[in-house]
Amino acid sequence: MTRLFNDPARFTDDMITGFAAAHLEHVRAVPGGVVRARPTRTGKVAVLTGGGSGHYPAFCGVVGPGFADGSVIGDVFTSPSAARARSVAEAAEAGGGVLFLFGNYAGDVMNFGLAARQLADDGIPARCFAVTDDIASAPAGQTTRRRGIAGGFVVFKTASAAAEEGAGLDEVVRVAEHTNARTRTLGVAFDGCTLPGSDAPLFTVPEGRLGLGLGIHGEPGVSEDTLGTAEDLARALVTGLLADRPADTDGGGRVAVVLNGLGATKYEELYVLWGAVARLLDEAGLTPVRPEVGELVTSLDMAGCSLTLSWLDDELERLWLAPADTPAFRRGTPQEPPVAAATRPAAAPRRPERSAATASGAAVEVAELAVHALRAARDVLHRDAEALGRLDAVAGDGDHGRGMCKGVDAALVAAEKAHTDRLAPATVLAAAGDAWAAEAGGTSGALWGVALRAVGAALPADRAPGSAELASAATAALTAVTSLGGAEVGDKTLVDALAPFATAFATRLRTGDPVAEAYASAVAEARTAAEDTAALRPRLGRARPLADRSVGTPDPGATSLAAVLTAVANLHTTTGSDPV
């Protein structure tokens, strides 16, 4: 149980404040996360770790000389937004470019990718790399679909050490890729974790059982097995990892090893387990190199552990052993070069934003309707937040309702301000979308952000939209979401509700139906489609490794979208206005 918090919605912000205050010699807080307390030398590649909070010491605990230059911190188990990532990158970069390192989760891939593209537009070289070490989340032939869990610690360490030595951006990326290709992790859970403010864990494990193949965001294991002795568990972990040994390694060799506790498994237990693991590795002809036993990538108060093996060559061994000095990890004494004022390449001209023109006449009324629609969305999402969280917890981390509330609250504030300034509908919705993405983070935050922007971009600035423009707006939202997220109908995502809605709405408008009737008909299709996702197996995102558990439960993203569309449809009943 997570017991110490103030407002659960501000848990991460409060944590960052306390963390920075406790480690003034290592870090300073910046919007979106933390960076090193002292600037690095000019020209150094800035290596930034990132992801949701709840995993300490990952990711912010490894910021310091010899390790990361900064950390982008999202809400608990939620990807940080692109805005947060960009903010931390701008504070940390020193002229050598930026490398974002994170686990292979859809929200992280989307948001860090967006941030990297924005930085590149400003003339700051930026790259992304997603760690894929979890052997339980996809078979050996589908390694790019695997999640990133505790093996990310080894990848982060070697890439950071390469950057500290002076390697350029391409070379640091190569080291990350090379380490990841030789790293494997397998984990187990004995009990679930509890989000701040919740009164029950995200999942439970029956007495005498364990969940094999857990995720680090409160996801249960992909299967269950009997909980035996420490010797039994050690054999299961080692055997599983050796069966997935990288193809370019021989039977023996030197390995970096991380035996990681997930938050509630005590160090004494881990050392009992390590005794058996060490013997089994020796029997397999493997030599551990400076093994790490302890809590390095946690999941709040989850009871469980994971074992990571990373097959070393001479280069990786040197980087693994290189000195580091961070709040949570120290090895040797890094020798920092003299600090020079950080510089960056001359920035390329930014692509112009859409003009924030003042609207007039009917366009102001359209902007006002957009604000009313966001208020309706706020009301329904706050009403359904707990239920949406329960849906998400079946095969995810249970934060969907909370994240949607944070997103819509921020979007409404931004839209109201833009409307008060009599700005055009496109600007109002762009402000709402950017605020939603920045505050909510995660996959849903990014998708709702681009969808609102796309709808606004299709609306005229000087008059009310016609049927053709409304049809185009619906289609543009769908295109923006699928382009960013890559989901298709049948993947069990919000696209399963958005696609039938957009198609039906555009089709009915183009055949001459009144706007309100076309919208109501399309919303009915979206609701049905959202309910029908219960029969689907997820093919993308965090729920995919737990696909069987998800069957029988509708997708939370599709469900929340249908609820919002329904609430907006109800505006016609209460106000007599057509939905935007």
Image (tube, rainbow, N blue to C red):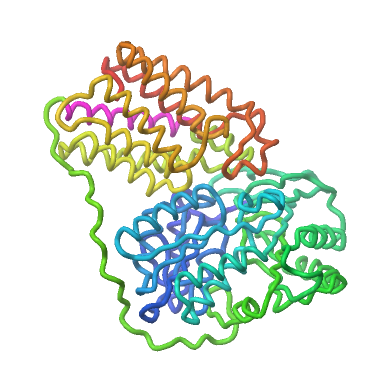
Which of the two residues, 436 or 544, is positioned nearer the viewer here?
544
Q: Residue at the location (17% across, 33% down)?
A: 461
Instruction: Return the x and y of residue 386 as percentages of the image width and height.
Output: 53, 35
Relative placement, left or right, of 10 versus 287 is: left
Relative placement, left or right, of 341 versus 159 is: left
Q: Main secondary structure of the magenta part?
A: helix
> Relative to residue 417, is residue 336 depicted above or below?
below
Quarter placement of the C terminus: top left
Specify start and end residues of the magenta stretch as a single range: 363-384
Quadrant of the rendered image containing residue 463: top left
Which of the two residues, 76 or 199, is positioned nearer the viewer here?
76
Quadrant of the rendered image containing residue 468: top left
Q: Residue at the location (56% across, 53% down)?
A: 104
Instruction: Return the x and y of residue 216 as percentages of the image width and height.
Output: 62, 54
Residue 573 visible here: no
> Relative to residue 383, is residue 508 depicted above or below?
above
Instruction: Return the x and y of residue 262 as percentages of the image width and height.
Output: 66, 59
> Relative to residue 262, is residue 136 depicted above or below?
above
451 part of magenta stretch: no
Residue 105 visible here: yes
Which of the two residues, 229 or 343, is positioned nearer the viewer here?
343
